[in-house]
Image (tube, helix red, strand yellow):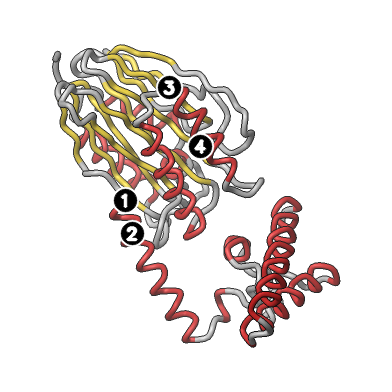
Amino acid sequence: MATIESDYLHQELDLRRSRLEEAIRSLGEEPRLVSLLEEVDAALQRMTQGGFGVCDVCHEPVEAERLLRDPLLRTCLDHLTAEERRALQEDLDLAARIQTGLLPRRDLGVKGWEATFHYEPAGSVSGDYCDLIPEGNGSGEFTFLIGDVVGKGVAASMMMAGLRATLRTLLSSGLPAAGLVERANALFCEGIAASQFATLVCGRASASGTVEICNAGHCPPLLCRGREVTPLPATGLPIGLFCRSVYESRTVDLAPGDGILLYTDGLSEARNGAGDDYGVGRLTRMVEAHRGDPPRNLVAACLEDLGVFRGASRPNDDLTLLAIRRSSMS
């Protein structure tokens, strides 16, 4: 386990120990509190003497993602009891239902714009983030967001949900895209471990066809304008790395038929049986062949080509695509 993660877990265990001691002083030596304190002390001892994060049954490492959620774990996934497996599956099913409920409507149609997305977790839940938020006044303006939280599984999905809540709350402030990302970064930093971060693209589309985009370390969106497909590189660092990061945005003007394809690295870094990456080059050629297509058709074409490339290989990461297109003059 990385040193940063080990330091974080040691701090987390020390904090839990202090809180348990305070609770015992206030409530008395309740058996459950005493038992928890003993578990924390045992985990701290394993950190000092060795053996922390090692499965008691097979002596292989316990999954780091699970330890970050619960540093008291002593068995890996392969050696959970039947009851533990059942409880874990119920938690995953609930998390998947909650995450599905957080997604926006699949297709967006506002004055002069159309958009759609594809969201596909590699497991039960995803660390990818996707949102489409139209202004409520019928102006034809909307905000689009796509992101990728480091890691996979439940821990990443919980961070994604927190990021979504933060950004949706900040939208009412009226900040431009760069200001929105800068403020979200500061808030995100306050609630995560030092080893955690997320990439993010925040875009704001206006009724006039102007789009403001801020890219915080994310895969470069592909701008489809006329006969050209151009990548839009990052304008800042991923959020969560430094609390005082400064972000910039760029502005592009889209004519009818122009659009933008955004995606997570579950697409660009997808692998086939030979271990080759799908790659941005192949994606760019695919977009060039389908420029001007409605968003739903473009996304479908990308997924079909990905399936051909990947063959029988299983997905190795969460996958999200988001396509927006200027459909008419307002």
Disc 2: which residue: 98
Sequence-wise, the earlier of marks 1 and 3 is 1
| Label 1 – label 3 distance at C-alpha | 29 Å
* Residue 215, label in figure: none
Residue 174 rendering spot, x and y as whole percentages: 36, 24
Is there CB contact under 8 Å for labels 3 and 2? no
Q: Residue 115, located in which quarter of the rendered image?
A: top left
| Label 3 – label 4 distance at C-alpha | 16 Å
Q: Nearer the viewer, residue 42 or 137?
A: 137
Give the amino acid at mark 2: Ile
| Label 3 – label 2 distance at C-alpha | 33 Å
Disc 1: which residue: 102
Residue farthest to the right, as pictured: 49
Residue 35 rendering spot, x and y as whole percentages: 67, 83
| Residue drawn at point x = 48 percent, y = 59 percent | 153
* Residue 231, label in figure: 3
